[in-house]
Image: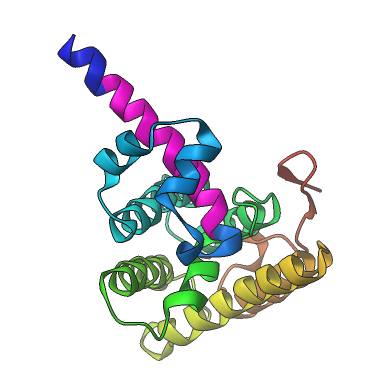
């Protein structure tokens, strides 16, 4: 009986977080309300309060749940590929696909909540900043692995990995912002072309990268050539 109650509690927690991630990606983390979510889902308000305790706890749990979704959708599909700029390109494709398919209805969850909390100190800001920093460092790590594997045409010591990571992230996030604002997919194609051109200009083996990016077909949930 105890195990059954625990599982029911875990299922309720998952149900709530699925809802709060979607809400926060559109309305922001400040748009979350324990009482409203309980009413929306037909749950006991006291039960939801027992699971999360406070609005801040709910916000932090939502951020951590969104991180798990992000890892599953963006990072895991390419994590076992060999080091090189092709792996970096595949990761960028994965990110553009994640944003364009609206895994979260507001586009990239972390782009949305970062704008909301970037100048607001506190635990929620710190959690977002940590996850954003982890993502930046992950891209830099993949680029550095490509550098050590001889993937760049320029001498290894002259490669500015943080600068290249910054440029790649800037193109992806601008595509997300424009697409969410204007409701168009063309921005993902432009970002993909820009990222691929930047990587092809840097790589020591251009044949390992496609000459052009795929056409992203977000109705099927995957790129198509």
Residue placed most toward the observer, 215 or 174 = 174
In this view, the residue in front, 159 or 10, is: 10
Q: Position of residue 181 (x, y in %)?
A: 75, 71
* Residue 196 place in picture, x, y as percent: 67, 70
Establish if 36 lies above or below 5.
below
Q: Residue at x 34, y 57 (%)?
A: 55
User: In the rendered structure, does residue 97 fall within the stretch colored magenta?
Assistant: no
Q: Is residue 167 among what the camera can see?
A: yes
Q: Quarter of the image holding residue 47?
A: top left
Q: Residue furthest bottom?
A: 158
Q: Is residue 51 left or right of residue 162?
A: left
76 shown above or below 107: above
Quadrant of the drawing holding the N terminus: top left
Give the residues drawn in magenta, as a range: 7-24
For the residue pair 188 and 35, the one nearer the viewer reads as 35
Closer-to-camera residue (211/89): 89
Residue 149 quadrant? bottom left
Determine the residue positioned at 58% across, 80% down: 170
- Magenta segment, prevailing SS (helix, strand or loop): helix
Q: Does residue 115 appear to the left or right of 201 in the view shown? A: left
Residue 133 as seen in the image, left or right of residue 209:
left
């Amino acid at each position: 009986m105890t195990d059954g109650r625990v599982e029911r509690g875990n299922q309720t927690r998952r149900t709530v977080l699925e809802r709060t991630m979607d809400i926060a990606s559109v309305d922001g983390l400040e748009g979350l309300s324990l009482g409203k979510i309980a009413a929306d889902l037909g749950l006991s308000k006291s039960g939801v309060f027992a699971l999360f305790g406070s609005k801040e706890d709910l916000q932090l749990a939502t951020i951590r749940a969104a991180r798990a979704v992000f890892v599953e959708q963006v990072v895991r599909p390419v994590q076992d590929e060999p080091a090189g700029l092709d792996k970096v390109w595949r990761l960028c494709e994965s990110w553009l696909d994640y944003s364009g398919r609206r895994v979260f209805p507001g586009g990239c969850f972390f782009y949305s909540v970062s704008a909301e909390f970037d100048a607001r100190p506190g635990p929620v800001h710190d959690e977002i900043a940590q996850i954003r920093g982890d993502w930046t460092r992950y891209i830099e790590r993949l680029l550095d692995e490509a550098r050590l594997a001889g993937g760049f045409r320029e001498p290894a010591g002259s490669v500015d990995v943080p600068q290249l990571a910054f440029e790649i992230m800037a193109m992806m996030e601008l595509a997300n912002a424009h697409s969410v604002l204007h409701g168009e997919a063309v921005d993902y194609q432009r970002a993909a072309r820009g990222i691929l051109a930047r990587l092809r200009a840097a790589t020591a083996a251009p044949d390992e990268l496609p000459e052009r990016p795929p056409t992203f077909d977000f109705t099927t949930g995957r790129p198509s050539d």
